Image (tube, rainbow, N blue to C red):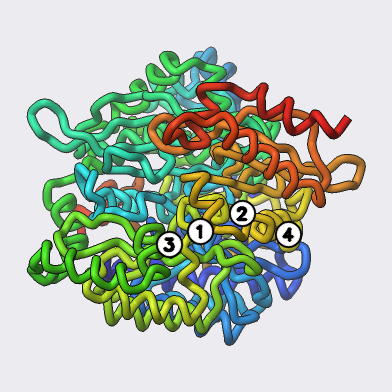
């Protein structure tokens, strides 16, 4: 993974010192609440319902075990001993003291971490595929490009006061696991006919109040032009994005208003004078970025022997066999598997993880996975490089710590924002809805029979829980001071992205498990052969679901 | 006489008469007049005349309106060499961003902030991107 040199360290250290001064001026009354607001937001600090929330950047979801242990220690020393993995692959502290945040940031800087631009109207953490570098369907590792974008976007002088937040995602594989069509800019690594690396660029996607699927602005951008082209897009957005209404300020609204062709012309006009300028990437820089993401020291294993040994363990322990089937994924190197660590055990807030669990995972990563851990936008963790022969020991340790719930990609692997329990923006609670659904569907055989199913819950229109792209989406809404839940069907992430369609009038919290049950029964009745929920929905449409759910309500 | 930060020091000075963009473009002896840019204005016609302008002021109606940052970079990238002054409601915490975009003068609404603001110009000594005074990004400068 990327390792700071003295330049990176200096930038982060100077940012900590600057923020310490800003915090002091606020506490001394020299800065008003209104002035301090954007300053603290650009360093990831929200003031929430009960306490501040500090969002720490995990660039493209990758951490080493020293960083994970530091997070665990900070959660103990400055918080209540647990943290939350966000849908931007970041880590959130729920209860830090505002005055102590500079100290937390200084400790983070000591392990090459920070909270720069994890909030505010600026370029946010660049996200990517959690299986980058190890996926079997990968064309090229997207992480060097993510790191290049991270450096370019960090404290960019021109783009710190944009009309609204700005999110970039990169994918480098056949299947899109980074949801690039739901981002302000999506970057897909592609090769041209000559085999050269470049990018397909998608712009104007986004969730939030007005969900929009990104559209292609460039089908092949040669690699060296990546940053100047991004700069041109940002410059058009900074100049022309709406600033009069925060709900119409995202780039998706601008792209829709101008039309993609006029927007492309405007970008190319801005691009022409800076294209081939000093920000053009050099071969040396591209090679330098790539040099941090080389293969770890894989053992050369006898694939068929490893397969036989694993099969024997699976045959003698069916619970283990089930976990292997549900929570591990094929690795591109023979004899290795990718392991998903589920943070979706029933009874715990989705995506939450305790200090003790983090320390255990760090130990396991050192022992079994080259000392690296990844966060996912589905709010789980990944150990990406585990020898098949170590899976059984690893599973036993995870199981003891409540980290082996075999539900990755199934109904109970719910994506869920912190919602009204924590967030001051939320209209409704989301965690109790997730828990009630997980509790209702505790029969795992039924859950597996349903097949892959993504259920995403957001507590408000800001859509942090990605409800628009869940096969089943749930959105908390406020109706005259009461919490209600709107259900949508047919959303999907991935290259055939779709936005969910609203089922109908919203429901009370206590009715939600039953509503989900009716939807699932409808699906089971209607599905043909091996259809997934999404397949069936796409074939039959929303009406059969609507009829079933609302039939008895009247 | 207004006090402002200019080239890293506090100075007092009267500038030339200031015209808005439309007035300036139509003015016959515009080389003697400053021009003030407001967010939302189109920069293109001014870029034709970068060699004639003695002073450009960029107004920040609120510190959250970041359009002025792009004005500054475009003017510098197109070769404007003269004074580029931020006016209005920007904050001292934005000074390193502003100066890296090409501003070399800062006229605060509240002049009592000037001494403290001078310190903010030193918040960062290193950065990743190219900037007006150092166009090479860090990746071209890394040892």
Q: Confirm whether circles 4 and 3 share one chain.
A: yes
Circle 1 residues within 10 Å: few <14, some 14–19, many ≥20: many
Q: Chain of mark 1?
A: A
Q: Earlier in the sequence, mark 2 or mark 1?
A: 1
Parent chain of label 4? A
User: Residue A132, how many percent across, how many down?
Assistant: 29, 53
Mark 1 lies on residue: A379
Q: Nearest the camera: A462 or A100?
A: A462
Image mark count: 4
- Do tag 4 and tag 3 residues touch (Cβ < 8 Å)? no
Residue at image mark 4 = A432
Looking at the image, do the residues carrying marks 2 and 3 touch, with CB atoms under 8 Å apart? no
The alpha-carbon separation of the residues under discs 1 and 4 comes to: 17 Å
Q: Mark 2 belongs to which subunit?
A: A
| Numbered disc 2: secondary structure | strand
**Are the residues at dot 2 and dot 1 in contact (C-beta closer than 8 Å)?**
yes
- Is A350 above or below relative to B29? below
> Measuring 62% from the left and 40% from the top, which residue is drawn there?
A520
Secondary structure under tag 4 reads helix
Element class at badge 3: strand
Q: Secondary structure at mark 1?
A: loop
Q: Which mark is residue A416?
A: 2
Identify the residue position indicated by label 3 in the image: A375
């Amino acid at each position: 993974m990327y390792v700071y040199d003295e330049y990176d360290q200096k930038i982060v250290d100077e940012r900590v010192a600057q923020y310490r001064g800003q915090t002091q001026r606020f506490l001394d009354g020299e800065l008003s609440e209104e002035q301090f607001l954007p300053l603290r937001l650009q360093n990831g600090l929200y003031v929430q319902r009960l306490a501040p929330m500090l969002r720490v950047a995990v660039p493209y979801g990758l951490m080493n075990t020293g960083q994970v242990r530091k997070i665990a220690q900070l959660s103990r020393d400055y918080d209540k001993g647990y943290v939350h993995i966000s849908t931007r692959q970041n880590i959130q502290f729920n209860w830090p003291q505002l005055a102590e945040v500079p100290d937390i940031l200084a400790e983070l800087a000591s392990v090459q971490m920070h909270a720069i631009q994890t909030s505010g109207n600026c370029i946010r953490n660049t996200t990517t595929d959690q299986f980058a570098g190890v996926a079997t369907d990968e064309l090229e590792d997207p992480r060097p490009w993510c790191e290049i974008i991270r450096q370019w976007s960090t404290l960019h002088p021109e783009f710190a006061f944009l009309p609204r937040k700005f999110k970039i995602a990169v994918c480098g594989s056949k299947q899109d696991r980074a949801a690039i069509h739901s981002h302000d800019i999506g970057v897909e690594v592609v090769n041209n006919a000559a085999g050269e690396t470049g990018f397909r660029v998608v712009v104007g996607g986004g969730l939030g109040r007005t969900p929009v699927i990104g559209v292609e602005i460039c089908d092949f951008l040669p690699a060296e032009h990546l940053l100047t082209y991004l700069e041109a897009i940002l410059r058009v957005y900074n100049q022309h994005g709406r600033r009069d209404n925060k709900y119409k300020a995202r780039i998706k609204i601008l792209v829709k208003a101008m039309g993609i062709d006029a927007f492309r012309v405007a970008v190319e006009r801005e691009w022409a004078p800076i294209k081939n300028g000093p920000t053009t990437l050099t071969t040396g820089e591209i090679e330098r970025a790539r040099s941090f993401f080389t293969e770890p020291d894989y053992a050369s294993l006898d694939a068929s022997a490893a397969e036989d040994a694993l099969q024997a363990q699976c045959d003698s322990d069916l619970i283990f066999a089930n976990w292997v089937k549900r929570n591990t994924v094929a690795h591109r190197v023979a004899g290795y598997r990718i392991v998903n660590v589920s943070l979706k055990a029933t009874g715990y807030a989705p995506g939450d993880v305790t200090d003790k669990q983090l320390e255990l995972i760090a130990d396991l990563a050192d022992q079994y996975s080259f000392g690296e851990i990844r966060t996912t936008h589905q709010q789980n963790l990944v150990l990406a490089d585990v020898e098949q022969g170590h899976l059984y020991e690893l599973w036993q340790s995870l199981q003891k710590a409540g980290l082996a719930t075999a539900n990755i990609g199934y109904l109970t692997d719910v994506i869920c924002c912190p919602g009204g329990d924590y967030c001051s923006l939320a209209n409704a609670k989301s965690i109790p809805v997730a828990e009630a659904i997980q509790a209702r569907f505790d029969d795992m055989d039924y859950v597996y029979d349903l097949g892959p199913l993504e259920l995403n819950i957001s507590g408000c229109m800001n859509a942090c829980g990605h409800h628009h792209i869940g096969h089943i989406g749930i959105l908390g809404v406020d109706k005259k001071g009461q919490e209600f839940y709107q259900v949508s069907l047919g959303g999907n992430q991935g290259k055939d992205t779709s936005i969910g369609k609203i089922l109908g009038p919203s429901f009370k919290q206590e009715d939600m498990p039953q509503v989900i049950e009716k939807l699932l029964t409808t699906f089971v009745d209607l599905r043909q052969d091996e259809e997934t929920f999404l397949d069936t929905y796409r074939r039959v449409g929303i009406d059969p679901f609507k009829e079933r759910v609302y039939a008895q309500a009247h | 006489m207004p006090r402002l930060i200019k080239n890293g020091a506090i100075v007092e000075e009267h500038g030339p008469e200031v015209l808005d963009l439309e007035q300036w473009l139509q003015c016959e002896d515009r080389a003697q007049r400053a021009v003030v840019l407001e967010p939302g204005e189109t920069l293109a016609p001014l870029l034709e005349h970068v060699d004639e302008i003695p002073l450009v002021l960029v107004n920040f109606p609120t510190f959250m309106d970041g359009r002025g940052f792009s004005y500054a970079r475009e003017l510098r990238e197109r070769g404007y060499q003269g004074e580029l002054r931020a006016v209005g409601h920007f904050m001292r915490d934005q000074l390193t961003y502003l100066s890296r975009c090409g501003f070399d003068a800062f006229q605060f609404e509240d002049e009592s902030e000037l001494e403290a603001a001078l310190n903010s110009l030193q918040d960062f000594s290193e950065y990743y991107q190219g900037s007006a005074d150092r166009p090479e990004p860090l990746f071209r400068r890394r040892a």
